[in-house]
Structures are given as structure tokens and as C-alpha cells.
Amino acid sequence: MTDDARDITRGFKDVFSRLASGVCVVSYWRGESVHGFTATSVTSVSLTPLRVLFCLSRGSDSHACLRPGLPVGISVLHAEQQILSERFARRVGEGNAYGDVPLSPVIRHAPVLEGAIGQIAARVAEIIPSGDHSIVLCDVTDAHASSDGEPLLYCKRTYHRLHHSL
């Protein structure tokens, strides 16, 4: 890679590090165990059909587990759930690394985290490779928003909270 390409890549990363995002955990069943990853690139796509997307590194362990039809949960994290964000951001391999994480009883179609301010159950509809990542389109099967709490935010490579209540 040339120095110019490195400078552009660094600048690109710096620009997007300044885009404040809500923090989500995307989770799925792997056998009897919950697995998942932290994501800030989660976006609503369509109302008809109800569709969301998230982006995921093609080199991640989770990428190999995703397939069309797989139920996934998307949990919009509460400001007090930073520890969960950090846990799901680490590689854990196989096993039951998240067996102690409480799941919500409100949504049963996919594993979503208890206490999240937003919970979505969906099924993977399509996986579109794009460079070193994939765009994963999902059809929503259930959604629940909490009336309590503030979102966990990520900006400039660190976690943040809102300074005022919404």
C-alpha cells in the first residue's frame, strides 16, 4: 500500500469515527448457545417489507454462521449496557460464552438482550458481499421499543451518553 493510500484509509477511518452511532448487539443461536457481535452499522431499510440491515466483516467468526433464513436478534443497547457491548465485541470462538447474559422474554423469535431499549427479531434475507464486509439484509418479524432509558452511543472510538434526557 502506498503512503497516499494509507493516508486516505486513515482519513476515511477518522471521518467515520466522528459519526456518532447507537450501539447494537446482533445475536443468533449457534446450537443451544447465543452468539453475536457488537454493531454500530445497523440501519432501517424499508417499511414494506419491514427490513433492516447491518454490516459485518467477512473475516469475523460470526460471518461464517450467517445464512438466509437464520433468525437474528438486534438489541439497541441502553446507556448502562456498555459492558455487554465490550463483551460482544471480542472474539469468543465456540462454546457458551454468553450463557449468563439474560435474554428478553418479550421477543421469542430470536435472542435479544434483556434491558435493551430497542429489540428486533428478524430473519436473514440476503447477504451481499462488498469489499472486506458484507451487507446483511433482514426481514423483521417482531419489534419492541422500551419507554425507559437512554441509548449507548459510540463516537471518536469511545462510548458516550446523551447529556440530556430525550
Image (tube, helix red, strand yellow):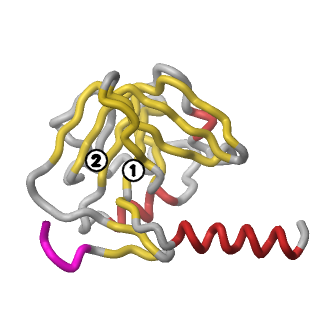
Residue at (24, 68) in percent of width and height:
80
**Which quadrant holds the C terminus?**
bottom left
Residue at (29, 38) in percent of width and height:
120
Number of residue marks = 2
- Report helix, strand or loop for mark 2: loop
Residue on which the image places disc 1: 25
Q: Give amino acid for label 2.
A: Leu
**In front here: 53 or 62?**
53
Q: Earlier in the sequence, mark 2 or mark 1?
A: 1
Residue on which the image places disc 2: 113
How far apart marks 2 and 1 lie (CA) works out to 8 Å
Considering every residue shown, the one lying at the far right of the view is 2
Residue 49 image-quadrant placement: top left
Q: Give the range drawn in magenta.
A: 162-166
Q: Classify 109 as above or below 36.
A: above
- Report helix, strand or loop for mark 1: strand
